[in-house]
Image (cartoon, helix red, strand yellow):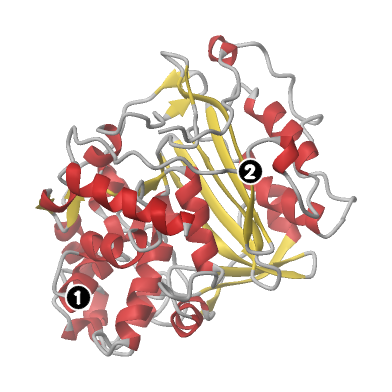
Amino acid sequence: MKRVFVILIAVVALALTGWFGVQLMGGSHTLANVPIPVKAAEDLPDTPAEWRGRIDYRRLDRQLSDLSQRPEMAGLAVAVVEDGELRFVRTYGVADASTGAPVTPRTLFRWASVSKTATGVLAATLAREGRVDLAQPLSRSRTTLRLPGGGEARVTLEDLLAQRTGLTKNAYDEKLEDGQSPELLRASLALAPLQCDPGTCHTYQNIAFDAANEILGEAAERPFAETVEDRFFLPLGMVSAGYGMDRLTGAKDWAKPHRGAHVRPVKEAYWRVPAAAGVESDIVDFATWMRAMMGVRPDVLSGPVLELAHRPRVGTARLYGGALRQATDDASYALGWRNFTYAGHRLAGHSGAVAGYRATMIFEPATRTGVVALWNSDWGFPFRIPFAAIDSYHKRTDARWLDLSELPPAPQTAHRAAPAARATLAP
């Protein structure tokens, strides 16, 4: 009943802030200078007395606190779901090093490529409803995407979402970052080099992947971003989650991108491909999304939809780099979704990176245990956090993913004066 009450308050707040009357631009919501609705107070597992489960949360908290002090970091937000329940929420460091504003559980971060998970489940939902055919060639849809040799007549929507276009990895991303139109870039991909024959291998894309924005929006008969928000985020109570640069920068509490202690300018590029990288939210709503991906909310995302979205379609190279790359194996890609093995356990989820932001959502489907983490810097080390938590859940002691002893000592920097923010959602 309490969760229903929270959602009702959130919906009223949405209406009062003009949520349902926002301007639609480029198929996504833009809320310039419109505040994100205030959540009702929630009881969060944000203190040691509330951290209960198999995972050693006190040790994890100490490790994350030490990690947040590294000069490569600015702010960090982490939530752990254990056995399907939210068991740990904690925030550290600063959302803005220039002001010392701390990260809180209401701080908005970018999901980056974790946004592809929402695209995949929307496609699966519309397929189950008979609104799209995953096996239909892209040429039969209204999309700006063109592939070499007329490949759009052979590549299906399923191929697109499983990253089997055959294009060279991250084709034309640099042109998107230079400000070129994603629609024109999609058309010009007809002249791009191929890594393999379309439909035969995995080659990761953003601009081509965002053709799903056009195809799924047409199938739903409403803009893509609006469809995701109204069909998934709002029913799940994820009132902080949505699409668009102005929506992020117009929020009262949002994490600025950093390089070390320096605030970086916000770049719009990847918001212009919303299906690939357009979502932002706070850490609690990110955890809510992970729980839905685990199957905890079948009223919003059913088991058959999740199975269709998460079923592996194509093998991929090992994930990440360095020690993590060596520790993972049997990687595959589904519909905007990754699956792989680690230490004998089958894991799933996605990670993402855009300038000044990183995000990860990794969990073990068998135990419904995993981690979401958001941070506003370019450092890749925190991608290890989910593996440390999963090791702790399985009582594995031989892995030391968050051991900082082999890294150079962290010098004191100005923004470290801000204390780690205690998790609280006071209205």
Residues packed near mark 1 inside 10 Å, few (<14), some (14 to 19) or many (20 plus): some
Q: Is residue 219 left or right of residue 310?
A: left
As drawn, the residue found furthest toward the right would be 398
- Mark 1 or mark 2, earlier in chain: 2
The x and y percentages for residue 78 are 59, 42
Q: Quadrant of residue 301?
A: bottom left
The x and y percentages for residue 165 are 36, 74
In this rendered view, identify the residue nearer to me: 3 or 325: 3
In the image, what residue type sits under mark 2?
Pro
In this rendered view, identify the residue nearer to me: 42 or 102: 42
- Under circle 1, the secondary element is helix
The x and y percentages for residue 233 are 35, 59
Specify the label residue 45 is tagged with: 2
Q: Quadrant of residue 186?
A: bottom left
The x and y percentages for residue 161 are 38, 73
In this orientation, does residue 168 appear?
no
Q: Quadrant of residue 414?
A: top right
Q: Residue at x 67, y 51 (%)?
A: 386
Q: Residue at x 56, y 69 (%)?
A: 294
- Label 1, label 2: how many angstroms apart (C-alpha)? 37 Å
- Under circle 2, the secondary element is loop
**Above-or-below relation of 348 to 379:** below
Q: Residue at x 34, y 72 (%)?
A: 122
Q: Which residue is mark 1?
A: 220
